[in-house]
Image (tube, rainbow, N blue to C red):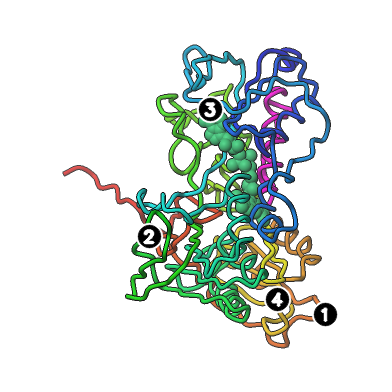
Amino acid sequence: MSADLKKGRIVIVGASLAGLRAAETLRDEGFTGELTLVGDEPHPPYDRPPLSKQVLLGRVPATDVGLPGRHLVDARWKLGVRASGLDPSTKEVLLANGERLPFDRLLITTGTRARPWPHPEEARLDGVLTVRTIEDAGRLAERLDAGPSRVLVIGAGFSGSEIASACRERGLPVTVAERGPAPLVGALGGTLGSFAARLQRAHGVDLRCGVTVTSLTGANGRLTGAELSDGSRIEAEVAVIALGAVRNTEWLEGSGLAAGPRGVACDAGCQAFNMYGIVTGEVFVAGDVARFPHPLFEYQMLALEHWGNAVEQAEVAAHNMVNPGPLRRPHLAVPVFWSSQFGLNIKSVGVPTFSDQVTIAQGSVEERRLVVVYGYRGRVTAAVSVNRAKWLDHYRHLIETAAPFPPEPGAADRPAAPKVVPSDVPDPKVLSHGPTVALTGHLPDRRLAVVRPMA
Ligand SMILES: Cc1cc2nc3c(=O)[nH]c(=O)nc-3n(C[C@H](O)[C@H](O)[C@H](O)COP(=O)(O)OP(=O)(O)OC[C@H]3O[C@@H](n4cnc5c(N)ncnc54)[C@H](O)[C@@H]3O)c2cc1C
């Protein structure tokens, strides 16, 4: 059995970070069969985090963000071609060019795309951009080079905030419009949300919270500005739509898999569920497109848009694809995320939105060096550091061991009287942008349905 799993045909759909790392791991684990990667982008795998950071600052050309391979992967690469369907009865991936790719095992790593501006005519105005691909970042960097009179960023999640930061670092006037009460509040809650708002304003961002952009306006096909829900108007030559991401699952319609707008559901071993919740056995999922249960977060289904998760989950998926049951591993890594903006290095471990309380465990807002620890029902579930990353391993251990919240004092620079306050994570529905972490399970204290006996 084990020897057979090292042979046969494996197809990976989605040739980016998770796809590449999975392909490398398959070969490292001794898979000697036929390996094919399908990617709809024309490029070999590349790294997305620099696209909203170094590329927009003009420090790295958009074309120079290739992902270094760990080694040369012996595989067939089908780039620039979209998978358009999956036929579960014949076990074939259908390609948009009419080709059919038979497989014994399939890995889905189709990730996400930028959520588009909801009004297509306005989205077509020259100057309206998103940032997800090399092309997107290259186009925006060019626009910023040209010195626009003002940039409007719609959505103040991580991407929107990083883009605003790059604009200010270039000295460009920038307005950020966010429907929620503060930047980053959807991911990090109220304490760091109000910190981020003060930070943005201190760096000269014209930050408008609690408003929505009702329309983008143009003349002769070019963007001229935007109307806001509070009746104000912004004149801008460039608008960056930073409304979060959409999972690339449409191609799986009719495949019988548990795939939808929230991603492709799988077990902790990355095996995809069919629509009845039964593991398929031969189809696996990894990266941004996957949603999976995590015991540390009450077995809720986690959907993460995190670089580190894409790598670790791809490695587990690949391992499990070529190893029999008893040797299979669960994907239990504690989520980790980082962002750099306005001169600060923000790092997160755990799931900050899985919280009801927070405390500043080290440093202070005034110093702009701090660690915020998150708790849920009396145990530590996350920690976020600002310019203080070296402590995160300590908090990761507290999360992994479900240590009591608030954590024991220990660090030298803890505040004299640490306060515990509500985490104030808003309902994602009140935000402009989609969340980068979504918990989509059922908590017993939040009744979503009532089952009544029939009369
Ligand atoms: C601008 C930006 C900045 C980021 N910054 C950070 C950061 O600072 N820290 C962090 O932790 N994470 C960051 N991320 C997130 C990180 O890049 C993602 O978590 C990571 O790219 C996920 O990898 P993936 O392979 O799962 O999916 P993706 O990178 O989305 O790749 C999926 C691939 O599949 C292709 N595809 C989709 N549908 C099909 C189909 N039907 N057929 C064939 N191919 C298909 C897509 O075009 C894409 O090439 C950032 C993302 C962006 C966009």
Q: Which residue is mark 3?
A: 82
Magenta stretch in the rendered image: 307-336
Q: Is residue 4 left or right of residue 424?
A: right
Give the number of the mark in front: 2 or 4.
2
Front one among 354 and 123: 123
Q: Pick whichever of labels 1 and 3 is earlier in the sequence.
A: 3
Query: Which residue type does callout 1 highlight?
Result: Ala
Q: Secondary structure at mark 3?
A: loop
Give the number of the mark in front: 3 or 4.
3
Q: Which residue is mark 2?
A: 218
Q: Secondary structure at mark 1?
A: loop
Circle 1 Cα neighbour tier, 10 Å, few/some/many (<14 / 14–19 / ≥20): few
Q: Pick whichever of labels 2 and 4 is earlier in the sequence.
A: 2
Q: Pick whichever of labels 1 and 2 is earlier in the sequence.
A: 2
Q: Which residue is mark 1?
A: 412
Residue drawn at 79 percent across, 39 percent down: 68
Q: Which residue is mark 4?
A: 361
Whole-number angstrom distance, CA of label 3 to CA of label 4: 48 Å
Question: In the rendered image of this protein, does residue 131 appear above or below residue 292?
Answer: below
The yes-or-no answer for disc 3 within 8 Å of ligand 1 is: yes
Q: Quadrant of residue 164?
A: bottom right
Quadrant assignment for ligand 1: top right
